[in-house]
Structure formats: C-alpha cells, structure tokens
Image (tube, rainbow, N blue to C red):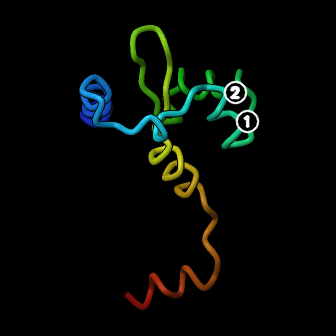
Amino acid sequence: MLERIETLVESLASEKLPQDDLLTVSQTSELVSLSISTIYSKVSRKEIPAFKIGKRLYFSKEEITAWIKSGKIKTIADIRNEIRR
C-alpha cells in the first residue's frame, strides 16, 4: 500500500497521473455516499485508501472503486462460480 501511495505521489509530481483520477475528500464523500467526517474517520483508522500531498488529502478514483467493490456481498451465483474454478 505504501509503495502504491509513493508511486501515486511521484506520478503526480511528474504529471503522469491524470487529474481525473484524483479525488478530493468532498468528491470521495459524494462517490461513496458517506459524510466528510466519516471519510476522515475512515482515513485515520486506515479503512479507506488515501494519500497526502503536502497537507491535502487525496484519493485515487481507481483505488476507491476497488475499495467499494471489495465490500460487495457475494451472491449465491458468485459463490458457485468460485467453487467451480
């Protein structure tokens, strides 16, 4: 995780990371339908992937999307497909 954050920071510094991939706290709050204070709480408890540039907190849209999907409740069909593999 730390390596990923360092990579994102380095990419941002060299402007290789598209601005569209960066989310602010407000944008992340809207995306995941949680309050801003809940976002900050989750960041402090390391429950949500985030990184800082200077004093500002940012989120990778790709990582937040993966984080949302990781909390998906599996359907019976999903479980059956996993068993068959």
Q: Rounded to the nearest whole Å, what is the CA distance between mark 1 and mark 2?
A: 6 Å
Q: Are marks 1 and 2 in contact (CB under 8 Å)?
A: yes
- Name the foreground residue: 46 vs 36: 36
Report the residue at 49% width, 26% height from top.
Answer: 58
Q: Position of residue 46 (x, y in %)?
A: 49, 29
Q: Quadrant of residue 52?
A: top left
Query: Residue 68 location, x and y as percent?
Result: 58, 51
Identity of the residue furthest to the top in this view: 55
Q: Using residue 40 as the reference point, say whether residue 67 is left or right of it.
A: left
**For residue 80, which numbered disc appears in the image?**
none
- Report the quarter where the N terminus lies: top left
Q: How many marks?
A: 2
Q: Quadrant of residue 25?
A: top right
**Residue placed at 37% from the left, 87% from the top?**
85
**Mark seen at residue 34:** 1
Which amino acid, by three-letter code, is at mark 2? Thr
Is residue 49 found left or right of 28 in the rendered image? left
Residue in front for this viewpoint, 16 or 79: 16
Mark number for residue 38? 2
Quadrant of residue 40 within the rendered picture: top right
Dot 2 lies on which element? helix
The answer to whether residue 73 is above or below residue 71 is: below
Residue 62 is left or right of residue 40, and the answer is: left
- Front in this rendered view, residue 79 or 55: 55
Q: Residue at x 30, y 30 (%)?
A: 15
**Element assignment for label 1:** loop
- Amino acid under label 1? Leu
Residue at 64% x, 33% y is 27
Using a 10 Å C-alpha cutoff, classify the residue at mark 1 as few (fewer than 14 neighbours), some (14 to 19) or many (20 or more): few
Find residue 73 and report its horizontal and vertical position in percent.
64, 65
